[in-house]
Image (cartoon, rainbow, N blue to C red):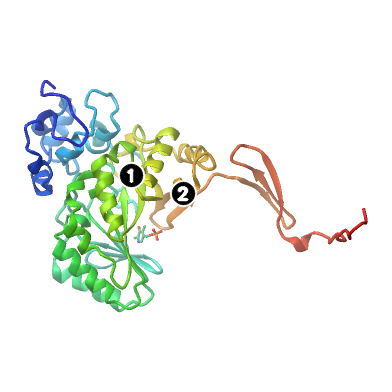
Amino acid sequence: MGLGALIPGEPSGPWAGVPLAQWRDWRWQLREQLRTSQQLSQLLPLSSAVQDLISSGQAFEVGITPYFATLADPTAANCPILRQVLPDAAEAHTAAFEVADPLGEDPHRKAPGLVHKYPDRVLMLVTDTCAAYCRYCTRARWVASGAERLGQDQWQQALDYIRATPQIRDVLISGGDPLLLSNARLDGLLDQLAAIPHLRFVRIGSRVPVFLPMRIDAGLVRALRPRRIPVYVNVHCNHYKELTPQAVQALAMLADGGIALGGQAVLLRGVNDDAEVLRETFYAMLSARVRPYYLFHCDPIRGSAHLRTSVSRGLQLMEQLVGFTSGMAVPKYCIDLVGAGKVPLWPAYVEQIDDAWVSGHSYKGLPWRYVNDPSAHTAVEKPTNGSQ
Ligand SMILES: *Cc1c(COP(=O)(O)O)cnc(C)c1O
């Protein structure tokens, strides 16, 4: 690199001379995103195939905050940080089953940015912008496309639908990254949602604590404060390296502000498809007050085959977590399908089940058998005292 080594989370490498006040300014971090081949080359040499992919304009949006870039190890062949955000020549290829809308959200649009797919909850997309762009983005067809305008008018249509639909009990605010909206807009949106009597809580999906922890300041925490209903923030984090002291501090500010934290990860080949990495990642989340919620199988978005594992590998990894680590550190492993929605997959601990018995094996592989329906067993006389 010739520009000095990277120190995770600190102004270093190409940014060695940047004053701390600027480094900690989230707007500066967004302005200085690495977007072009030339900017990315400050970090590491790019192959001509990757340069062509970026300059062709065919690649999904590219953008990495300088902060997140310093978590990388550009000298490693398979840096788990870079693999998530740096375009790969393999993106140019579409594999079998890959589609533009892998979750089948489009047919469930009820208003601009509003997806009503499950009976009692909705997904509200409030921006198409992110602090950095994941190469496996499940909404790659929509994120950073500017295809849908999401101003106040569009929000009102979504809010009208939620107000008129009493079976909706919670709203998942996502995008793009909602925490890139201004504090005033977030505050206003949460005020309006909290005023809808049938809503019981609100959740926000975000990767800002990981990509741009400096965004989380007293003003934002105040905007997200619990109102009549609580606010959950589900943080997308895939590797323990992302939980730097800066990220942990940002999460602590949210938690101290009364915001409940959950974690979601995406299973990615060459990033976290390793039992040790997953165990440490979920443990690091819990240590940062983030309860792991979902481990998503990587959706079949176009050009993402190099990042996907098999489902059987995912189940094998779950078997290496369950029982071997704190139950709080084991999320639900899910595939997400167009028609069926999220399907949780759990290793097959139950092997046989009939009216009388349930049997299977434990996490350590020990066989067990357990009474299923007690009425399927003939009663045995309870021994009385003194009798044998
Ligand atoms: C994931 C998702 C939700 C929330 O689902 P939970 O299982 O409750 O976390 C809601 N709407 C859509 C469209 C989703 O994809």
Does dot 2 land on a helix, a strand or a loop? Answer: helix
| Vertical comparison of 134 with 223: above or below | above
Looking at the picture, tell me which residue is in the foreground, 235 or 348: 235
Provide residue 70's location: percent of width, then percent of height: 19, 33
Residue lying at the far top in this picture: please name it. 2
Q: Is mark 2 within 8 Å of ligand 1?
A: no
Give the quadrant of residue 47.
top left
* Marked residue nearer the N-terminal end (1 or 2): 1
Give the quadrant of residue 195.
bottom left
Task: Indicate which label's residue lies in the foreground, 1 or 2.
Answer: 2
Residue at the (18%, 57%) spot, across then down: 218
Res 32 seen here = no
Give the position of the N terminus as an image quadrant.
top left
Residue at the (13%, 28%) spot, across then down: 13
Looking at the picture, tell me which residue is in the foreground, 10 or 94: 10
The residue singled out by tag 2 in the image is 328
Provide residue 200's location: percent of width, then percent of height: 36, 71
The residue singled out by tag 1 in the image is 98
| Vertical comparison of 257 with 289: above or below | below
- Specify few, some or many for label 2: CA neighbours under 10 Å numbering under 14, 14-19, or 20 or more: some
